[in-house]
Amino acid sequence: MEQTKIQHAATETSGKNTIIATESGTVNLLINKTKLTSIPQGTNIAQIYPNLKKTPDLKVSFYISANEISEIVENQSIRYHLTEKNSKHMVIPGNITSIPANPITTKDGNFYQVSAILNLRPKDYQNIHYGQTGTVSIITGKSTWISHIKNTLIHQ
């Protein structure tokens, strides 16, 4: 108990224990670091994510199999479907911004990490927060409903 009082008194008088953020935003604590009783000086204990309402462009990254990458080009349209339980179902359009030259090799095969920018409307920012997950649909071609029905009937 005496050691706790001494440590507490030391933290109250030391100016080195002050945490000052250089910008405003959402604080993400690094939980594995905060379970320690003492943290070495210079250790990252938190990250500050930018305020989503002030950031007009949101980036999403996803993986595409090496077998399917030939149909994907930069500036191609995507649809990002939010699958979060707590938010309402949303579909956000976007465009592919970068496709790497080389795939990443995993135990499940070779995949390309593709990046896209989402085109959010101002009202969409109310339902978006960090940590949400979703699925991406890539629009590889367009046809009219009549063309689709005609192709389905002819090819059956």
Image (cartoon, rainbow, N blue to C red):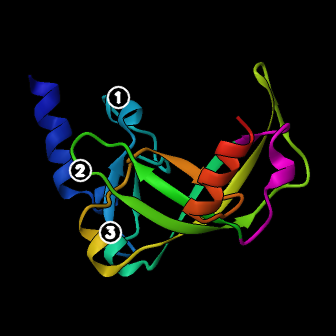
Residue at far front of view = 154
Q: Amino acid at mark 2?
A: Ser
Give the percent coordinates (x, y) of residue 10: 21, 47
Mark 2 or 1, nearer chain start: 1
Residue drawn at x 26%, y 61% as measured from the top left: 127
Residue 25 image label:
3
Give the percent coordinates (x, y) of residue 142: 66, 64
Q: Reply yes or no: does residue 19 show up in magenta.
A: no
Q: Amino acid at mark 1?
A: Leu
**Residue designated by label 2:** 87
Q: Mark 1 and mark 2 in contact (Cβ < 8 Å)?
A: no
Give the percent coordinates (x, y) of residue 141: 71, 61
Q: Tell how many labels.
A: 3
Distance (Cα) linking label 2 and label 1? 34 Å
To which quarter of the image does residue 50 belong?
A: bottom left
Mark 3 or 2, nearer chain start: 3
Q: Amino acid at mark 3?
A: Gly
Left or right: 155 with respect to 110? Answer: left
Left or right: 78 with respect to 46? Answer: right
Question: Considering only vertical position in the picture, is 55 above or below 80?
Answer: below
Range shown magenta: 64-75
Residue at far top of view = 107
Callout 2 secondary element: loop
Residue mark closest to the camera, 3 vs 2 = 2
To which quarter of the image does residue 107 belong?
A: top right
Residue mark closest to the camera, 2 vs 1 = 2
**Residue designated by label 1:** 36
Give the percent coordinates (x, y) of residue 87: 23, 50
